[in-house]
Amino acid sequence: MTAPLSPVDGRLLAGLAAGAVRARLSGERLTAQLPRSGPVHADGASFVTLERAGALRGCVGTLEPVRPLHRDVVHNAVRAMQDPRVPPVTAADWPELDVKVSVLDQPADLPAGSRRVLLEALVPHVHGLILTDGARRATFLPSVWAKLPSAELFVDALLRKGGWGEWPAGMRALAYGSTEFQDRSPRPPL
């Protein structure tokens, strides 16, 4: 991202994500009023999280900017509906669906020579974390700290998510921040 996102930009992105989900569920076409320029047109990385009654219904995103942010959000919203970790989102989910968009900052390297070294460098409740070793990669958004409040729990759960047993010698860690926006519009049944 080149310019910071305003609250108006955030509402627009969260509305785009919700609109993409609604359009996919209803078979309608997504229509949106976008500004002609601004930060939502810059390449950006985002995650879209879908929850119903606090239960995960999908969370998919990009860790690096690959397309304009507004397109990235729509793309990830549609993909989150089919997150392979949970059953697909259906029209029955729509009235109670919480739609959140996390816009990621540029990741920065953290020392990762060992689990202990990483734990000392990690800033709880601030950093999102990417662990990578060869072709294997796993991430937790900063919002995951709400469910895993200590650095030890956070890192250990991410290691399990990535399928690592012991700390690999070539482990690389990257930290990032994110700005979260939520669509709170009413959701009548489809």
Image: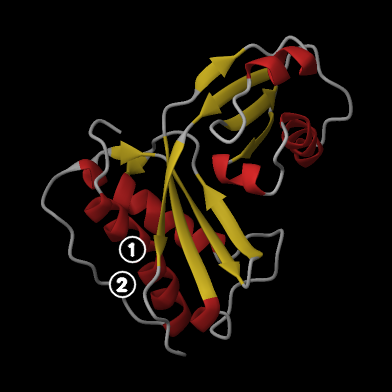
Compared to 42, does 48 lie above or below? below
| Horizontal relation, residue 79 to residue 33: left or right | right
Residue at 62% over, 73% down: 53
Write down the quadrant of residue 20 in the picture: bottom left
Looking at marks 2 and 1 on the same chain, the residue that comes earlier in the sequence is marked by 1
Number of labels in the image equals: 2
Q: Position of residue 189 (x, y in %)?
A: 47, 90
Image-based side of 164 in relation to 82, left or right: right
x then y, percent, for residue 29: 31, 76
The mark found on residue 77 in the picture is none
Please give the residue where the numbered disc 2 appears in the rendered image.
30
In the rendering, at what x and y percent does residue 77 appear? 46, 60
Side (left or right) of 110 relative to 171? left
The amino acid type found where label 1 is placed reads Leu
State which quadrant residue 157 falls in: top right
Asked if the residue under mark 1 is in contact with the one under mark 2, i.e. CB atoms within 8 Å, the reply is yes
Q: Nearer the viewer, residue 151 or 11?
A: 151
Q: Which residue is pictured at 64% across the width and 11% down the height?
A: 111
User: Element type at marker 2?
Assistant: loop
Q: Observer-nearest residue: 145 or 66? A: 145
The residue wearing badge 1 is 16
Instruction: Give the CA separation, mark 2 to mark 1.
Output: 8 Å
